């Protein structure tokens, strides 16, 4: 692991196309350093005391508009000097398709993962390549796919099962809609206060401007996927044009979670796309089970200006993007102490951004205190407001 990025990467001189929301670093960000200079879009999962990352190998020349085609590697992430993570025991689990082999017309991108009692469950983007004989053009068609592996050992040996999903059932009916988005994010939803039992559900965003700030909440059934809910995402400056799903939820208790997600704005000061990473507060209604995001922080945690010129891509995009995050909790009380966001810098490298979750937890607790006070004063109707209050007793693990 390179030691070239010892200091935080924030520059004192803003980029000429720096938007106003990226002028100041977020106070919760503690440290940024390089994890791998040969992998990007890295997902991560923790199990059996180990941390496993899966990232796409870097390609030095990628054509705009085409999917990722390099090898997909799994690696153990171990801590070294100063508590920094670094890759170890790297093994390739999915080989790049041969360009002249007609049997290999599938790509897998944007790997996001959780660990369940049944082993690994990951969400990815499955890209099919189709050639139009009439026009002579090649189309790349994205759809979500589930990865499964029974153990860490099996995963490191490349033993995975990939199940693509082309459609989802609508509202417990026989009607189905096509799934065409790239974001497919698995999450464990706790079913009890200690988080010992959970249900796997997925966030997915369809393509199209009409879906730019709407996520589908999906459950898996014997017939495939079912749409449980359409969830609106708040619009702020850093996700003004599209809201992506980011990494798996970080649960504070059975009903409240921190959501590390990304978004972008188009034509910032007339230049291309600008991808940022921020945090939102997810709540689960204790009666209906529906999700909502009552708050999305208007100040992003990570912006391309924090990452330097290497975040620029194709001369039209400036990219900070995430597929995974690592939680550090107090071993006794399970209190969340640190979030490490794995950040894709310009589709070339993976950085670790260490974030103190205290400001996030404080905001949520204060918002709930105000809700409690308003209810006590009779200013709000309990029947019309069901924001679950954050428990300080047993956070979900």
Image: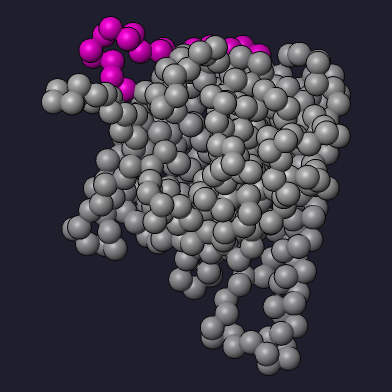
Q: Position of residue 152 (x, y in %)?
A: 53, 24
Residue bounds of the magenta highlight: 88-106
Residue depicted at x 81% and y 16%? 4
* 201 to the left or right of 266: left
| Residue 92 colored in magenta in the image | yes
- Residue 104: image quadrant is top left
Residue depicted at x 75% and y 77%? 370
Residue depicted at x 54% and y 12%? 60
Q: Is residue 193 visible?
A: no
Q: Which one is in front, 62 or 165?
A: 62
- Residue 146: image quadrant is top left
- The answer to whether 103 is drawn above or below residue 117 in the figure is above
Q: Position of residue 335 (x, y in %)?
A: 76, 51
* 325 to the left or right of 242: right
| Residue 383 colored in magenta in the image | no
Residue depicted at x 48% and y 56%? 213
Q: Position of residue 224 (x, y in %)?
A: 28, 46
Counting the numbered discs, the total is 0
Q: Is residue 17 visible?
A: yes
Q: Position of residue 129 (x, y in %)?
A: 28, 24
Q: Which one is in front, 390 or 293?
A: 293
Q: Residue furthest bottom?
A: 378
Q: Which one is in front, 118 or 289?
A: 289
Q: Residue furthest left?
A: 134
């Amino acid at each position: 692991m390179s030691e070239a990025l010892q200091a935080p990467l924030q520059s004192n001189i803003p980029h000429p196309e720096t938007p106003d929301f990226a002028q100041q670093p977020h106070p919760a960000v503690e440290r940024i350093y390089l994890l791998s200079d040969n992998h990007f879009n890295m997902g991560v999962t923790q199990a059996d005391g180990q941390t496993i990352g899966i990232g796409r190998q870097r390609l030095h020349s990628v054509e705009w508009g085409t999917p990722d085609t390099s090898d997909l590697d799994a690696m153990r992430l171990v801590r070294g000097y100063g508590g920094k993570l670094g890759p170890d025991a790297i093994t390739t689990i999915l080989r790049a398709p041969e360009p002249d082999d007609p049997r290999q017309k599938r790509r897998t991108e944007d790997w996001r993962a959780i660990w369940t009692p049944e082993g690994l469950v990951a969400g990815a983007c499955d890209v099919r390549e189709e050639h139009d004989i009439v026009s002579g053009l090649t189309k790349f068609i994205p759809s979500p796919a589930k990865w499964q592996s029974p153990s860490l050992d099996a995963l490191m040996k490349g033993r995975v099962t990939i199940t693509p999903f082309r459609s989802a059932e609508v509202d417990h009916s026989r009607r189905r809609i096509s799934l065409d988005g790239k974001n497919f994010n698995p999450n464990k939803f706790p079913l009890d206060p200690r988080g010992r039992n959970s249900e796997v559900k997925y966030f997915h965003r369809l393509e199209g401007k009409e879906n730019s700030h709407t996520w589908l909440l999906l459950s898996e059934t014997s017939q495939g996927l079912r749409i449980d809910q359409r969830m609106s995402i708040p619009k702020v400056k850093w996700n003004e044009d599209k809201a992506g799903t980011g990494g798996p939820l970080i649960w504070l208790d059975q009903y409240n979670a921190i959501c590390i997600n990304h978004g972008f704005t188009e034509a910032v000061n007339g230049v291309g796309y600008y991808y940022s990473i921020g945090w939102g507060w997810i709540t689960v209604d204790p009666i209906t089970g529906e999700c909502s995001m009552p708050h999305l922080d208007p100040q992003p945690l990570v912006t391309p200006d924090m990452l330097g010129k290497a975040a620029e891509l194709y001369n039209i995009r400036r990219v900070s993007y995430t597929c995974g995050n690592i939680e550090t909790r107090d071993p006794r009380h399970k209190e969340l102490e640190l979030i490490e966001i794995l950040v894709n810098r310009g589709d070339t490298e993976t950085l670790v951004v260490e974030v103190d979750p205290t400001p996030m937890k404080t905001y949520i607790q204060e918002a709930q205190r105000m809700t409690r006070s308003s209810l006590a004063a009779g200013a709000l109707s309990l029947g019309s407001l069901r924001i679950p209050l954050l428990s300080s007793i047993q956070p979900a693990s």
